């Protein structure tokens, strides 16, 4: 049920905006690993986001990265359902890249 609400017009409006994109603008080494800064576009709106890299793994065929971050949906202009949905949304990404 929750996934249907997240995809609905109240939140992501996935039917009209089926693609989310992230464009990296900086990769910063930290004492504990890496932080990736970039621009997240959802529902046609772009906002900055910072992702903390949790793990990186490689083999001959692929690169796997796990990262987490937080989005302030009010700062993005997504203010529907105030009081019913959290202002900050926690992201957890598991990305696998393979050669094209």
Image (cartoon, rainbow, N blue to C red):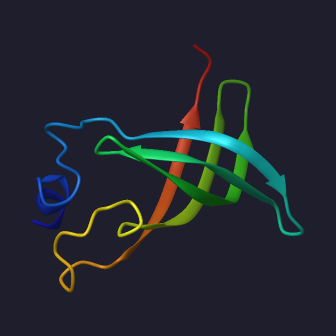
Instruction: Residue lying at the far bottom in this picture: please name it.
Output: 83
The reply, left or right, for residue 58 in relation to residue 83 is: right
User: Which residue is depicted at the point 16% across and 36% down?
Assistant: 16
Residue 35, horizontal then vertical, whole percent: 73, 58
Instruction: Residue lying at the far top in this picture: please name it.
Output: 100
Seen from the viewer's position, the closer of residues 67 and 77 is 77
The reply, left or right, for residue 55 in relation to residue 93 is: right
Residue 91, horizontal then vertical, whole percent: 46, 63
Residue 51, horizontal then vertical, whole percent: 62, 58
User: Which residue is depicted at the point 23% across and 78% down?
Assistant: 85
Residue 17, horizontal then vertical, whole percent: 23, 38
Q: Quadrant of the C terminus?
A: top right
Q: Quadrant of residue 21?
A: top left
Give the number of callouts: 0
User: Which residue is depicted at the point 13% across and 60% down?
Assistant: 10
Q: Quadrant of the N terminus?
A: bottom left
User: Which residue is depicted at the point 86% across and 64% down?
Assistant: 30
Seen from the viewer's position, the closer of residues 94 and 49 is 49
The reply, left or right, for residue 1 in relation to residue 38 is: left
């Amino acid at each position: 049920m929750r996934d249907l609400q997240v995809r609905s017009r109240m939140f992501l409006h996935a039917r009209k905006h089926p693609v989310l994109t992230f464009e990296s603008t900086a990769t910063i080494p930290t004492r504990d690993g890496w932080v990736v800064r970039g621009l997240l576009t959802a529902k046609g709106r772009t906002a900055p986001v910072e992702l903390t890299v949790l793990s990186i793994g490689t083999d001959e065929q692929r690169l796997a990265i796990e990262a987490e971050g937080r989005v302030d949906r009010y700062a993005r202009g997504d203010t529907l359902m105030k009081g019913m949905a959290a202002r900050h949304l926690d992201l957890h990404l598991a990305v696998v890249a393979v050669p094209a």
